Image (spheres, helix red, strand yellow):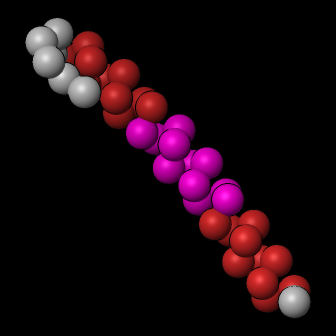
Amino acid sequence: MALLMGIIFATQYYWYVAKVIYRKYKKQSALLCETDCN
């Protein structure tokens, strides 16, 4: 049970970190090219 809780916590934590990194990367790429960059 504790292992399962640890896995869930780690998954949520890494998902949050990935979203933050993705937003930073997206912001930088938007600055680099103004045309058609998603």
Instruction: Name the residue rendered at 50%, 49% in the picture.
Output: 18
Asked if residue 30 is positioned above or below residue 22 in the image, the reply reads above
Image check: 9 left or right of 37?
A: right
Instruction: Name the residue rendered at 70%, 77% in the picture.
Output: 7
Image check: 11 left or right of 23?
A: right
The magenta region covers 12-22
Q: Is residue 14 magenta?
A: yes
Hey, which residue is sitting farthest right in the picture?
1
Hey, which residue is sitting farthest top in the picture?
34
Q: Please identify the dominant SS of the magenta region.
A: helix
Residue 9 screen position, x and y as percent: 75, 67
Residue 29 screen position, x and y as percent: 25, 25
Asked if residue 17 is positioned above or below residue 24 in the image, the reply reads below
Instruction: Name the residue rendered at 45%, 31% in the picture.
Output: 23
Q: Is residue 7 magenta?
A: no
Residue 1 screen position, x and y as percent: 87, 89
Asked if residue 36 is positioned above or below residue 25 in the image, the reply reads above
Residue 30 screen position, x and y as percent: 27, 18
Task: Give the image quarter of residue 13.
Answer: bottom right
Asked if residue 20 is positioned above or below residue 27 in the image, the reply reads below
Task: Give the image quarter of residue 37.
Answer: top left
Image quadrant where one finds the C terminus: top left
Q: How many marks?
A: 0
Along the line of sight, the residue nearer the viewer: 19 or 32? 19
Instruction: Name the residue rendered at 61%, 48% in the picture.
Output: 16
Image check: 11 left or right of 36?
A: right
